[in-house]
Amino acid sequence: DFFVSSVHRRKILRVDKSGVARDFTTEAQDGLMAVMALGVDAPRRALWASTAGVTYITGFRTEDEGRSFVFEYDLQTGKLRRRLGPPAGVTDGHLSDLAVSPAGDVYVSDPDSGRVYRLGAGDKELRVLVPAGPLGSPQGLALSADGRWLFVADYTQGIARVDPRSGAVALLDPPLDTALTG
C-alpha cells in the first residue's frame, strides 16, 4: 500500500496494490488540517503526517491559521497515537515536510524559520536539530540509505547535508549548470 495526502480535503488516503483508494482518515479526523507530508515507519507500524492551518482547506477556521502539528497514526488501524506541536519555547514553529529514519527518528522542516526539528525514536517531543540561520527555507527531506546523513532541499540555497547527530550543516556544491533554487 501507499498513502496520499489531501491538502484541501484534510485527509489521508490509502491506495492498495490494485489501485483502489480508501480513506485512511476521514476529513478533519482528529483535527487534521491541510495534510502537508507523510512518512511511513514500517518497523514500528506508524504513519507520520504533518498538518497545517492554511486558508484553502475545507472548513477553514481563522483560529487555525499558522498552527501546525505532526500526527503519528497506527499503520494498521488508522488510530491516532499522538499529536505533537513545535518544540517547547518555539512560538513561531511551522511543521512542514518530514522524513523518517531507519531507526524511527522523525525529522521535520520549518520553511518559515529555517529550522529543522528531530523527534528521536524514544522522545516525547520535537527538539531543534538545526537552529534558525544556516538554512533559509528548508523544504523536502531525505535520509541516506544508512541513515548517516539527512539531505535538506533549501529553497534559497540548494541542497544541504545535515549530520542528524550534531545538526551540523554543509551545503553541497552542485554542477555549475544546475539550478537548485526554488
Image: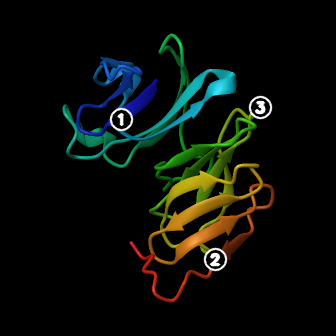
When asked about the image quadrant of residue 100, the answer is top right
Relative to 83, residue 74 above or below: above
When asked about the image quadrant of residue 7, the answer is top left
- Label 3 to label 1, Cα distance in Å? 26 Å
Residue that label 3 marks: 122
| 115 left or right, relative to 111 | right
Of helix, strand and loop, which one carries label 2? strand
Residue that label 1 marks: 5
**Horizontal and vertical percent position of residue 146:** 76, 49
| Mark drawn on residue 171 | 2
Residue at figure coordinates x 72%, y 58% from the top left:
149
Q: Are marks 2 and 3 in contact (CB under 8 Å)?
A: no
Residue 132 is at least partly visible in this image: yes
Q: As shown in the figure, which amino acid type bears the numbered disc 1?
A: Ser
Of helix, strand and loop, which one carries label 3? loop
Q: In this view, which residue lies farthest toward the top?
A: 77
Q: Residues within 10 Å of mark 2 (few under 14, many from 20)?
A: some
Q: Residues within 10 Å of mark 3 (few under 14, many from 20)?
A: few
**Number of numbered callouts drawn:** 3
**Horizontal and vertical percent position of residue 79:** 50, 14
Considering only order in the chain, which callout, 1 or 3, is on the residue closer to the N terminus? 1
Applied colour scheme:
rainbow
Q: As shown in the figure, which amino acid type bears the numbered disc 2?
A: Leu
- For the C terminus, give its image quadrant: bottom left
Q: Nearer the viewer, residue 2 or 136?
A: 2
| 171 left or right, relative to 75 | right
